Amino acid sequence: MKRLFFIFFFTTAFFTQAQDEDIVKIIDDLTVKWDKRAGELGKYTGLKYYCTSDFYRNETIELLDKIHHYDTVLYQVVSEKYAGTNDKEAKATLDEILTVETEYTTPNFKTFLSEECALYNEASEEYGTQSGSKFYKKVEKIEQELAKYVENITNRIDLIDEHIHHLKLN
C-alpha cells in the first residue's frame, strides 16, 4: 500500500511540474504569436486583412481565444500554487490576467474591430478604390485607434508573460 501511495505521489508531482512548465512554454509561444499579429493589426494592411479576409479574422480570433483559455489555466495554476502567500509577483500576475479576462475579452475585441471595419468599409465605399488622400486620412484615424487598442492588449499579454518568468512555477 505504501508503494502505491509513493508511486501516486511522485507521479502527481511529476505531472504537476510538467503541466507548470508546459503552461509557461505555451504562454511564451502565444505571446510571440500575438506580438506578431498585433504588429500586423496596427497597420493598414492588417486592418484591411482583418476586415476583408474571413481566414485572417478567424485566425486572429482563434489566437485570442487560445490566449484567454491559457490565461485562465495560468490563473488557476498561480492561484493554487501561491494561495495563502503574499507573493507580490503572483498577485501582479493574477491582476494582469484579470484585466485581460475582463477588459479585453474576445467579444470586446470582436465588437471593437467590427466597428473599425465598418468605418474602414464606409471609407472604402465613400472614396472608392482610388484611395486618395481623404481615404488615407480617414483610414489613418481608424488605424491609430486600432493600434492603441491592440497595443493595450499586447502590453497586458507581455506583462503576464514577464511575470510568469519571475514566478517559480516548477
Image: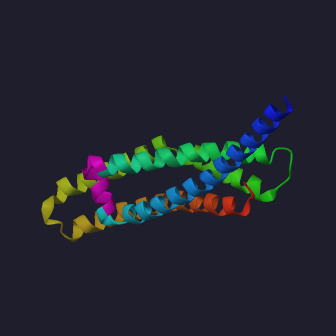
**Looking at the magenta stretch, what is its main secondary structure?**
helix
Picture layout, residue 102 above or below residue 121: above
Front residue of 64 and 142: 64
Taking 169 as reference, is 102 left or right?
left
Front residue of 17 and 47: 17
Magenta stretch containing residue 54, yes or no?
yes
Front residue of 87 and 95: 87
Quadrant of the rendered structure where residue 75 is? top right
Tell me if residue 98 can be seen.
no
Residue 146 position in % (x across, y down): 41, 59
Taking 94 as reference, is 146 left or right?
left
Q: Magenta region: which residues? A: 46-55
Task: Say which quadrant the C terminus sits in.
Answer: bottom right
Residue at horizontal 50 percent and vertical 56 percent from the top: 30
Residue 142 position in % (x across, y down): 36, 60
Display coloring? rainbow
Picture layout, residue 84 above or below residue 128: above
